[in-house]
Amino acid sequence: MSDIEKIKQLRKSTRAGFKDCSSALEEAKGHIDKAIEILRIKGISKASKKMSREAKEGVIAASGDGQKTSIIEVNCETDFVAKNNNFINFVKELSEFPGAKNFTYHHTVVKDNLSKLAAVASLETKEKSKNLDLFGKQLTMHIAASNPLALDSESIKKEILEKEQELISKELKNLGKPEEIAKKISIGKLNKFKEENSLLSQPWVMEPKRKVKDVMNDLKISDLKIKDFYRLKIGE
């Protein structure tokens, strides 16, 4: 990837200016992930859940039934190959097994169960209702759009929180905040990060004034649980 392409990718990921991106890349010796951290610490870019990665072409396939679901990503070098029927049929054969689809959502569909982004969710309950089916379908749409890191704040990986805490601390130090004030701000920022990246506490994409857990409670299904979920996007 050329320097100009790296700067374009960095600007897209951070919304920082050309000059800031160029300087950060130079300081990071061409490493985009490190450059994002540098811009974040300087207060030029916002926090990001994932560091940017080089985009790849290909498709994502999701198939399954009420008991299990497969979701796979198959990459290729060009979009031309990704749209080729032989490639599409190969991925379909690779991913499918007998059974109806589980709660699955596809975004930017290529064909049938093939897309550029897919999300699946597994719900656990003894009850069956139309409201549950609708919630399951909408939940996968929410996951695709909001990209949560974990079900709740306690489930977010320790290393992710430690990295976020490190970036927050460096950012506040760079801004010259007094230690006591920095501690309070740091706690607030980290709690906000947890809330924004936990599925249950995220604003419901269909009705942002409510959280996912509120929508679940309104279903009045006492034993309803989100057992697991997964989101996959080409290049990530």
Image (cartoon, grey):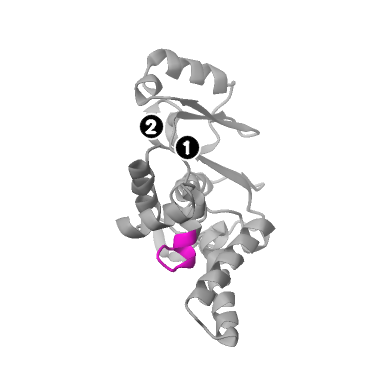
Residue 44 within the magenta-colored segment of the rendering: yes
Q: Position of residue 124 (x, y in %)?
A: 65, 47
Q: Position of residue 114 (x, y in %)?
A: 44, 28
**Residue at point 49%, 47% (across, down):** 31
Vertical relation: 120 (above or below) 149? above
- Residue in the foreground of this view, choosing between 9 and 85: 9
Q: Which mark is residue 109?
A: 2
- Which amino acid is tagged 2? Val
Residue 153 within the magenta-colored segment of the rendering: no
Could you tell me which quadrant the N terminus lies in?
top left
Magenta residues, start to end: 38-46
Q: Residues within 10 Å of mark 1 (few under 14, many from 20)?
A: some
Report if residue 152 is visible in the image. no
Q: Secondary structure at mark 2?
A: strand
Q: Which mark is residue 223?
A: none
Kindly report the distance in space between the C-alpha atoms of the residues bearing marks 1 and 2: 16 Å
Vertical relation: 130 (above or below) 73? below
The residue mark sitting in front, 1 or 2, is 1
- Which amino acid is tagged 1? Gly
Q: Earlier in the sequence, mark 1 or mark 2?
A: 2
Q: Position of residue 17 (x, y in %)?
A: 31, 59
Q: Which mark is residue 235?
A: 1
Farthest-out residue, left: 18
Q: Are marks 1 and 2 in contact (CB under 8 Å)?
A: no
